[in-house]
Amino acid sequence: MSKRSKLERRVGDIFQIVLPNGKFAYGKVFRDASVGIYQRIFDSSKHPPIDSPFAFIVGLYDDILTSGKWPIVGYEPFSSSESEWPPPMRIKDPISGEYSLYHKGLIRPSTKSECESLETAAVWDADDVIDRIMSTMKYLG
């Protein structure tokens, strides 16, 4: 019995997601266990450059990329080391209702108004990302 080796992933890697409708979505690996999912959906497999803004940026379970479930199909370096980081994300304490801001691995107190337009800090599974892509496809190019 052979052990399956895990794949390395690195910041700037581009990965492919086969959608339930047979179309293809793509994402890019950020720092801090996060990925950006490109807005554009393709009818056939494509290699970078993707030439599309991100629809959303979320945390992603590492095994989705290291297992090969979503294969790495290319690499595009970020324009700067600062742009390798995902944008700030919000945390709302379910008991106190207080807000915090998570950015670059640090959490600091925040306000509701500062956090309103931010993505919620969470780690997503593959099915959740696919569901979000499929539910927003009408807005995608």
Image (tube, rainbow, N blue to C red):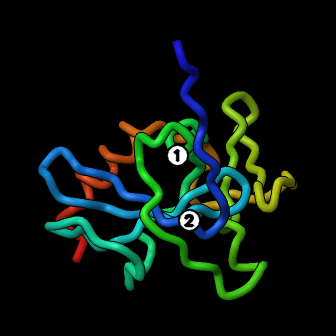
Whether residue 7 is situated above or below residue 105 in the rendered picture? above
| Gap between marks 2 and 1 measured at Cα | 10 Å
- Circle 2 Cα neighbour tier, 10 Å, few/some/many (<14 / 14–19 / ≥20): many
Residue 65 at what x, y percent from top left? 52, 45
Q: Amino acid at mark 1?
A: Leu
In the picture provided, is 78 more to the left or to the right than 81? left
Residue 43 figure quarter: bottom left
Residue 13: mark:
2
Residue 65: mark:
1
Q: Nearer the viewer, residue 94 or 138?
A: 138
- Residue sitting at x 45%, y 63%: 27
Nearer-N-terminus badge (2/1) = 2
- Residue sitting at x 69%, y 47%: 91
Residue 64 at what x, y percent from top left? 50, 40
User: Is label 2 in contact with label 1 (beta carbons under 8 Å)?
Assistant: yes
Residue 2 at what x, y percent from top left? 54, 19
- Residue 98 visible, this orientation: yes
- Residue sitting at x 67%, y 50%: 33
Q: Amino acid at mark 2?
A: Asp
